[in-house]
Image (cartoon, rainbow, N blue to C red):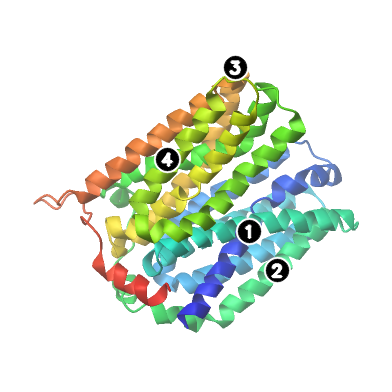
Amino acid sequence: MATLLLALIYLAFISLGLPDPMLGAAWPAMQQDLGVPVSYAGLIAMVISAGTIVSSLLSDRLTRRWGAGRVTAVSVLVSAASLLGFSLVGSFWPLLALAVPFGLSAGAIDAALNNHVALHYSSRHMNWLHCFWGVGTVISPFLLAQALASQHGWAGGYRTVALIQIGIGVLLVATLPLWRTQLAHTEALRTTARALRLPEILRIRGVKSLLVAFFGYCAVEGTAMLWGASYLALHRGVDPTTAARYASFFLLGITVGRFLAGFVADRLGDRGMIRLGLAVMVVGIAGIWLPVPGNGLALSGLVLLGLGCAPIYPAIIHSTPANFGAHHSQAIIGVQMAAAYTGSIVAPPAFGLLADHVNIALFPAYLALLTALVAVMSERVVRRTAEPVRADGSGDAPGGRDSSLDATRSQGGH
């Protein structure tokens, strides 16, 4: 039973990754068909991101009431219905309206699945599951390209992905009883403990540092994805085709890195994986930055940056129940997701302004500052969550590892 449920969660992570690159990949064709300015893609992306932030913040209430299995299954079906709607509309404003439920469903899936995996599975599986998210992001642009080549157009690509998600959603609904096999020690918490409000979450010792670290990591990832090719082409003089290929290797580095991280994550632990990832990121940024003849080092640096990024997101998520307790993990992971989306939204445009008004050569320096922020704040989380709670009870956060989590992970994760 546990193995079958794990397979379903892997499938759900693929479903989570499928829609993410669709808008960017399809927009050149969509923009022409819809007859709107190129910049309107930004409006859709902003609405989707706003929805994900809202549903991430509400995830604690939703999951406590309905459970991770139901939230995941319903959210996948809502996402599928939204994508199907994308394929049927013929004008921009209905598309913008459909972005609302799509964004809400994405945030709910992300927070519910990540918390469930953090509670019930080992760090190894957390890395491999996020690797499968990367598999989803690779599949959907391929399906879109096939649809465009076969004259079905971008709508055909959206329709294909929607049908895949409907199939996954129906399978998740049909197998909901499997989720109950892992809820023995969390069911009581889900039904008796009340959901925390945002100010209460922020008062938990170490949470603010955790959110800043997560914001910083996703800011690095988003900035590298958006501006890596432009930096190589405009500042280092790399041929645009080569620059684009190596920029895509950054994402490949994340996917491959998470696969490789799964083999050592249980041995090194979440803290060790974060430190290892940061060290590789520093080496990658140094390769991008150093003004040596030729471009081999800069190109390799971008790939190394992706490999270094790979274990950090899964490790931060996976360590949350151990650092803050299972009773707080869903609330904190929901807020983490909101911080992640905020970092992805804010940091890349901010660097765009910096590149516009100062110089795009600041790209590695910008990444280095954000990486330093992640390193400082993640170490601060370790210190704060290891401190004993004061006599007045302030900073309500447990020190050390929640031993009940280890037992649960050993039952469901292998």
Q: How far is the residue under mark 4 from the one under mark 2?
A: 36 Å
Q: Is residue 281 left or right of residue 94?
A: left
The numbered mark, 4 or 2, whose residue comes first in the sequence reads 2
Mark 2: few/some/many CA within 10 Å (<14, 14-19, 20+): some
Q: Residue at x 35, y 45 (%)?
A: 210
Q: Is residue 202 left or right of residue 245?
A: left
Q: Is residue 315 left or right of residue 247?
A: left
The numbered mark, 1 or 4, whose residue comes first in the sequence reads 1
The numbered mark, 2 or 1, whose residue comes first in the sequence reads 1
Q: How far is the residue under mark 3 from the one under mark 2?
A: 44 Å
Check residue 278 in the rendering and tell me which mark sits there, or answer none: 4
Residue 370 versus residue 207 in the image, above or below:
above
Q: Nearer the viewer, residue 345 or 359?
A: 359
Question: Is residue 76 visible in the rendered structure shown here?
Answer: yes
Disc 1 marks a residue whose amino acid type is: Val
Residue position for label 3:
357
Are dots 4 and 2 in contact, CB under 8 Å?
Answer: no
Residue position for label 1:
135
Disc 3 marks a residue whose amino acid type is: His
Q: Residue at x 46, y 78 (%)?
A: 179
Q: Residue at x 54, y 29 (%)?
A: 287
Q: How far is the residue under mark 1 from the one under mark 4?
A: 23 Å
Are dots 3 and 4 in contact, CB under 8 Å?
Answer: no
x then y, percent, for residue 96: 69, 49
Residue 131 versus residue 405 in the image, above or below:
above
Check residue 127 in the rendering and tell me which mark sits there, or answer none: none
Are dots 2 and 1 in contact, CB under 8 Å?
Answer: no
The numbered mark, 3 or 2, whose residue comes first in the sequence reads 2
